[in-house]
Image (cartoon, helix red, strand yellow):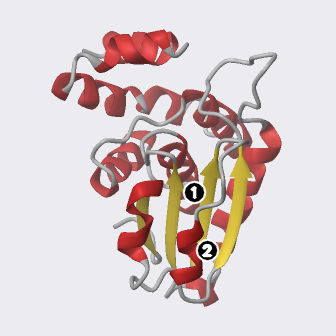
Amino acid sequence: MLVRFKTTICGIDELGDHCEAGITHVLSILDPDAPEPPVFGSFGEHARIELRFYDAIEQLADRVVPEVQHVQQILTLGRDLTAPAAADSHLLVHCHAGVSRSTAAMTLMLAQARPDCSGVEIVNEVLRIRSRAWPNLRIIELGDTLLGRGGDLIGAVPIAYRSQLQRRPELAQLFIADGRAREVEKARSVL
């Protein structure tokens, strides 16, 4: 574990599994038109930030995609969690499936909290937290710049992509069809 606070990543359908986990902070990343998950009424008292954008890595005219201001909000939450008073915190980050937007957000928050760790160490920690991680490359690119990591995180995320494609090679075509060929190319460049 790289940070003092507890970390959980999940999808919407898994939120109910965490009602009794002592969650203190929630980062919800939802599609712009998705309803708010009602399960949060079952959680104890917690601070919650909700961001709304699609899981896309390229600028699209008809879609709200991750932008700098979204990543800044992610990093603000991460900064709050590194305060000494937040040592007993438990962060839950979720998106639709708990695979892409949420794992990218966790990658950035861990990198911010531990600037002494390499991108490889950070990505491996995210894979430990969520073994099916496929961090959204656009979020990683924006965050790498804001954190001044010099491409370290961008260079490390193909570890996660490669891990997924080794287990499920059919994912390559799904991600390519979804406009995310750059991620698949990065995975193949390290295979």
Q: Residue 38 occupies which quadrant of the picture?
A: bottom right
The answer to whether residue 77 is left or right of residue 7 is right
Q: Residue at x 42, y 42 (%)?
A: 99
The answer to whether residue 21 is left or right of residue 145 is left
Q: Decide: marks 1, 2 in contact (CB < 8 A)?
A: yes
Q: Residues within 10 Å of mark 2 (few under 14, many from 20)?
A: many
**Depth check: 44 or 33 in front?**
33
The numbered mark at residue 44 is none
| Residue that numbered label 2 is attached to | 81
The C terminus lies in quadrant: top left
Identity of the amino acid at label 2?
Answer: Leu
Residues under labels 1 and 2: Cα distance? 9 Å
Question: In this view of the protein, can residue 152 be seen by the observer?
Answer: yes
The N terminus lies in quadrant: bottom left
Rendering coords of residue 175 (x, y %): 43, 18
Rendering coords of residue 61 (x, y %): 81, 16
Identity of the amino acid at label 1?
Answer: Met
Placement of 16 over or under 104, stated as above or below: below
Q: Residue at x 50, y 67 (%)?
A: 92
Kindly state the secondary structure of the residue where label 2 is placed: helix
Placement of 27 over or under 16, stated as above or below: above
| Residue that numbered label 1 is attached to | 109
**Depth check: 124 or 114 in front?**
124
Q: Residue at x 47, y 55 (%)?
A: 12
Rendering coords of residue 88 (x, y %): 49, 88
Q: How many marks?
A: 2
Q: Residue at x 59, y 32 (%)?
A: 55
